[in-house]
Amino acid sequence: MRHTEKDQIVTIARRVYQKLADQIIAGELTPGQKLEEIALAEQFGVSRTPVREALRELTAKGLAESMPRKGVTVARIGIEQLTDMLEAECEIEALCARLASQKLNALEKQQLQIIHDRGAMTVNTEDLSCYLALAEQLHTFIASGSRNLTLISTVRALRDRLAPFRRAQPGNIKPRLSRAVEEHRLIVNAIINGDPEAAYAAMRTHNARLSTGVLFRLHEQAKTEKHLEPELNMVQRPSAKVPGSRLPIKGSVLSGHDPKRVRKGRRRPSTRSKC
């Protein structure tokens, strides 16, 4: 296969992946629903090869599951599991920001400022895709600035897994971008000024707000699913709280959590944090 053909397949696969990821997060594709390779190829008007690659990426990111004799299905991601991951990302990226403020040299700080400035330009153009790419570059640069390979790999894995959820943030694009860019400005300024505690606090606050937005969206989505209301009202569910947020989010059937399987007396230990 020629190089240009490979590039085209990768591009198409990425587009199919993003569309399927968005549908999963929006609840259009429900937990346990089968993802048929042939049907998806027909739906998107593409060959089976990019669809196969997209399904592999969904599986790698934890949004889909591949089971013997069952094929690929939409993954059942629990609210509690998602909350744990968001909390971990919040703290680990904050630590990376603290270390980066101590370890980045003058040239690297200039590069960080350039990335931020490019991201700020997306507010006026309201180019969400461009902003997301630059935001990812900014966070990756800060993680690399920690000079800690364990932290870098952990951040990479968490951000990859949580990327579709961040993309599905509620709200109008311009106010959303304006707020995110302002939070990035505080993070970047603290790192450039060599202020470890300010860098830690700014990054933690930024990620905590995003975490609240993610869980709030899923919470509201669960409330609108009328056919689930009888089960939701009959069962007392464990609640999880996003670090830095006052919003309690109840376990969702969207996550594949079956109310009939809830055991009496089984309660999840508190994961409250100052994040």
Image (tube, rainbow, N blue to C red):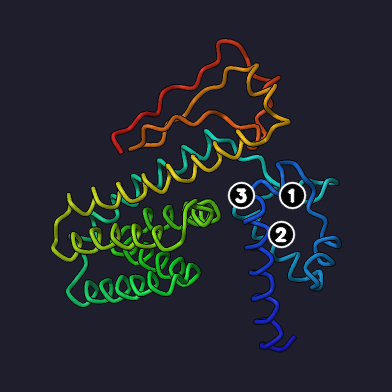
Rendered position, 210 above or below 193: above
Q: Contact (CB < 8 A) between labels 2 and 3?
A: no
Residue 156 screen position, x and y as percent: 45, 58
Question: Residue at horizontal 33%, vertical 70%?
Answer: 120
Q: How far apart are labels 1 and 2 at the CA level?
A: 9 Å
Question: Residue at horizontal 47%, vertical 57%?
Answer: 172
Q: Contact (CB < 8 A) between labels 1 and 2?
A: yes
Q: Residues within 10 Å of mark 3 (few under 14, many from 20)?
A: many
Rendered position, 61 above or below 128: above
177 left or right, relative to 98 = right
Q: Quadrant of the C terminus?
A: top left
**Closest to the observer: 72 or 216?**
216
**Closest to the observer: 79 or 266?**
79
Q: Residue furthest top?
A: 265
Mark 2, residue position: 55
Q: How far apart are labels 2 and 3 at the CA level?
A: 15 Å
Mark 3, residue position: 25
Helix, strand or loop for disc 1: strand
Residue 168 screen position, x and y as percent: 54, 53
Of badges 1 and 2, the one in the foreground is: 2
Q: Which mark is residue 256?
A: none
Q: Amino acid at mark 3?
A: Ile
Q: Amino acid at mark 1?
A: Ser
Mark 1, residue position: 66
